[in-house]
């Protein structure tokens, strides 16, 4: 009889096969390039130095173009101390296997990318041309749009965050424009004892409208909100935790409210463009020195008198009413907006790495799939395909 001692079973030998495969999965190491934004008046950056430090601590590598964070008041030194390599040649940044940008890359930037690069950026479909997608396809780029990525609750986190900032900012901007310094009526946007409170009218009960209303109420103003969705108006009341004046979009009611208001905020979107709910005749009847902030201007605007302005030349006066019609309001508060974006992107990148890399995670993550519009140069997003009349493939069929 053998006296050879028995070898005890190890924990891994007792594990079921599926769990052993999980143990053996290797985490992916990401090589990420962050170029400096070149789009007009874009000052945001995708990741803060703190986020970069957290990711480099997990073995990921960053190549960041010099000055990429300056617009948001993050220095090269902060990124370098976080473990990133600072590049003085743009080409070196775009040679990374993954590129992070706030704005979509230009055609010149696409030329600098290596084939089969993974691109994370906004899509901004209404500003694009067919040639943009053709150039990405030539390089077999895999591209994901921030503005289409969904979270586990089915919402669009970066769009939500940007809308929150825009809603709060619209009231602060209006407050500045009402002051004497900016040629306004000299009104304080608040409720001072013995002084009638200012009146704010908001068109749209979505995220922008909600946060504009919340900020206005917090400053002591009287707030009225218009929207054609009774469900949105009801949800707004619940979210604010207080009863405010709400109404559907009825012409006579709108005219009466605009005559009395000091500030009007446009926060309606629409499927193709923002609906124009305030005519030029209505604007003519508004009080002299009152303020319009049309947050919907990136979709055409919901005031008939609206026209695009810029951060450096932000206002114009028509019918004695001050108009502010700057798209991309979050870039005005670049540091806050950058931290907000970084808080969403950083966990996403870590998730991609922990699941074994991008190629693996995209097969199973429906939220990321919702944001993908190109996979190895093949168009996979129906909205983009319909908008530009380009053939597309169902993403799920590519993984069979």
Image: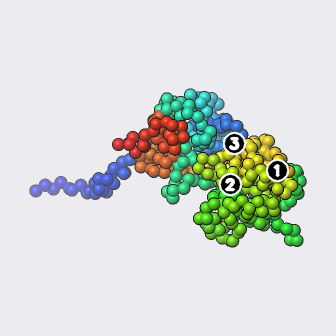
Residue 200 percent location from the top left of the image: 76, 61
Q: Nearer the viewer, residue 31 or 253?
A: 253
Can you identify the residue that label 2 sits on? Answer: 267
Q: Nearer the viewer, residue 373 or 73?
A: 373
**In the image, residue 383 above or below residue 215:** above
Q: Earlier in the sequence, mark 3 or mark 2?
A: 3
Residue 179 appears in which quarter of the rendering?
A: bottom right
In this picture the colour scheme is: rainbow
Residue 46 appears in which quarter of the rendering?
A: top right
Neighbor class of circle 2 (other Cα within 10 Å; few <14, some 14-19, many 20+) is many
Residue at left offset 29%, top offset 56%: 16
Going by the image, does 243 lie left or right of 126?
right
Where does the N terminus fall, quadrant-wise? bottom left
**In the image, residue 136 above or below residue 282:** above
Tell me the distance, in whole angstroms, between the alpha carbons under discs 3 and 2. Answer: 23 Å
Residue at left offset 57%, top offset 51%: 344
Can you identify the residue that label 1 sits on? Answer: 322
**Tags 1 and 2 in contact by the CB under 8 Å rule?**
no
Tell me the distance, in whole angstroms, between the alpha carbons under discs 1 and 3. Answer: 25 Å
Q: Earlier in the sequence, mark 1 or mark 3?
A: 3
Residue 117 percent location from the top left of the image: 50, 35
The circle drawn on residue 43 is 3
Where disc 2 sits, the SS reads: loop
The circle drawn on residue 70 is none
């Amino acid at each position: 009889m053998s006296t050879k001692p028995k070898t005890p079973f190890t924990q891994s030998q007792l594990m079921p096969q599926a769990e052993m495969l999980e143990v053996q999965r290797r985490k992916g190491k990401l090589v990420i390039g962050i170029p400096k934004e070149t789009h007009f008046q874009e000052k945001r950056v995708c990741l803060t130095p703190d986020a970069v430090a957290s990711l480099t601590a997990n073995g990921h590598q960053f190549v960041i173009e010099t000055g990429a964070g300056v617009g948001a008041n993050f220095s090269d030194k902060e990124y370098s101390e976080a473990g990133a390599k600072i590049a003085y040649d743009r080409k070196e940044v775009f040679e990374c296997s993954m590129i992070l940008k706030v704005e979509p890359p230009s055609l010149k930037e696409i030329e600098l990318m290596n084939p089969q690069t993974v691109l994370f950026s906004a899509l901004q479909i209404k500003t694009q041309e067919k040639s943009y997608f053709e150039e990405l396809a030539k390089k077999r780029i895999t591209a994901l749009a921030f503005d289409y990525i969904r979270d586990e609750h089915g919402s669009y986190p970066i769009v939500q965050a940007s809308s929150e900032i825009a809603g709060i900012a619209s009231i602060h901007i209006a407050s500045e424009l009402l002051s004497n310094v900016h040629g306004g009526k000299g009104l304080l946007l608040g409720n001072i004892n013995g002084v009638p409170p200012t009146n704010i009218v908001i068109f749209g009960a979505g995220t922008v409208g909600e946060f504009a209303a919340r900020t206005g109420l917090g400053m002591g103003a009287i707030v009225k909100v218009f929207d054609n969705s009774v469900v949105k108006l009801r949800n707004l009341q619940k979210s604010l935790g207080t009863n405010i004046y709400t109404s559907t979009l009825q012409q006579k009611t709108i005219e009466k409210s605009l005559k009395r208001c000091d500030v009007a905020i446009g926060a309606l979107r629409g499927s193709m463009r923002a609906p124009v709910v305030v005519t030029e005749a209505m604007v003519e009847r508004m009080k002299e020195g009152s303020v319009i902030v049309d947050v919907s201007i990136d979709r055409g605007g919901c005031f008939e008198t609206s026209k695009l302005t810029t951060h450096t030349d932000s206002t114009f006066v028509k019918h004695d009413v001050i108009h502010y019609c700057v798209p991309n309001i979050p870039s005005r508060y670049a540091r806050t907006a950058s931290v907000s974006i970084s808080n969403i992107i950083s966990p996403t990148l870590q998730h991609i790495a922990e699941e074994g890399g991008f190629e693996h995670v995209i097969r199973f993550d429906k939220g990321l799939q919702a944001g993908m519009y190109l996979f190895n140069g093949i168009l996979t997003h129906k909205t983009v395909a319909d908008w530009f009349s380009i053939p597309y493939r169902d993403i799920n069929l590519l993984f069979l």
